[in-house]
Amino acid sequence: IDGVFADKTLAGKKVLITSGPTFEPIDPVRGITNISSGKMGYALARACRDAGAEVILVSGPTALAAPVDVTRIDVTTAQQMHDAVLAEAARHDVFIAVAAVADYRVANRSEHKLKKQGAAPTLLLTENPDILAAVAALPNGPFCVGFAAESQHLVDFAEAKRKKKGVPLLVANLVQTAMGSDANEVVLLDDAGQHPLPIMGKDEVAAAIVHHLARQLNAKQG
Ligand code: CTP
Ligand code: CA
């Protein structure tokens, strides 16, 4: 177990990770959310910890236990995730955005439970802040790693996302393969091009991502 990261490639580094879905309330008992088990983000938190990093995991609602020796901050909404991340980002060396953040929240959320009477209610949606783009835009901010879950045109859509958000490393995966599964098949995208990885367990994928990011980070710091 210990051999893989015997070299502790992230020793002394502080790593901030988002994981899981966000949940955006409609009323006290209902909401809209994204499908995300949190498994990939939690696997990355463990992999970074095993590589010697100090890890904070900002997690949306999941069924997973907090990894040992990782500080977990529990949040529900995208706005809460944004605020927790921006309070921590500046003092971190690496930010990895794995969370499936809801792109929109309900603007006309009801304080009380909606009753089934009369016409069907209309939900007004308003856009949530883009957490990864906000961190990537920080002056002297952390090294940013993004994820892109696509259902088609994987590499093209993901590379466009990498450019738009201005992140040096992006992990692209097909939702059909990744969602809910213990395995994942990803393509790493960086300035050097495409690096497809074989289908593996999420722990192995996480180890490969850590290996890749540590090399980029150390090259950057010369
Ligand atoms: N992300 C984020 N905050 C958001 C939306 C996305 O931090 N409000 C992050 C995700 O954690 C992921 C990356 O941005 O690392 C890409 O998320 P994705 O949903 O694939 O991309 P979007 O830019 O939201 O584009 P779209 O959903 O339209 O494909
Ligand atoms: Ca999105």
Image (spheres, grey):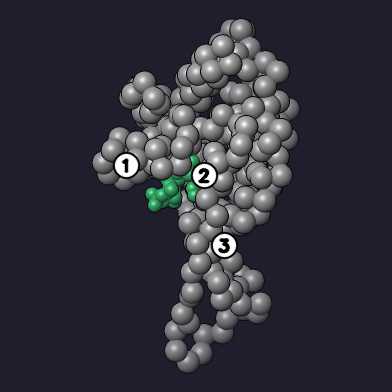
The numbered mark at residue 157 is: 1
Q: Position of residue 148 (x, y in %)?
A: 41, 40
Q: Are marks 2 and 3 in contact (CB under 8 Å)?
A: no
Whole-percent x, y for residue 207 in the image: 51, 20
Label 2 vs label 3, nearer the camera: 2
State yes or no: Cβ of the residue under disc 1 lies below 8 Å from any atom of ligand 1.
yes
Kind of residue sitting beneath label 3: Glu
Q: Residue at x 61, y 36 (%)?
A: 139
Mark 3 surroundings: few (<14), some (14-19) or many (≥20) residues within 10 A? many
**Disc 1 and disc 3: Cα gap in Å?**
26 Å
Q: Earlier in the sequence, mark 2 or mark 3?
A: 3
* Neighbours of disc 2 within 10 Å: few (<14), some (14-19), many (20+): some
Residue placed under numbered mark 2 in the picture: 133
Residue in the picture at 66% in, 45% down: 86
Labels 1 and 2 touching (C-beta < 8 A): no
Residue 18: numbered disc: none
Residue type for callout 1:
Phe
Between 93 and 154, the one nearer to me in the picture:
93
Residue at image location 51% in from the left, 21% down from the top: 213
Whether disc 3's CB lies below 8 Å from ligand 1 is answered: no
Dot 3 corresponds to which residue?
Answer: 24
Q: Secondary structure at mark 1?
A: helix
Give the residue type that dot 2 points to. Ala
Q: Is mark 2 within 8 Å of ligand 1?
A: yes
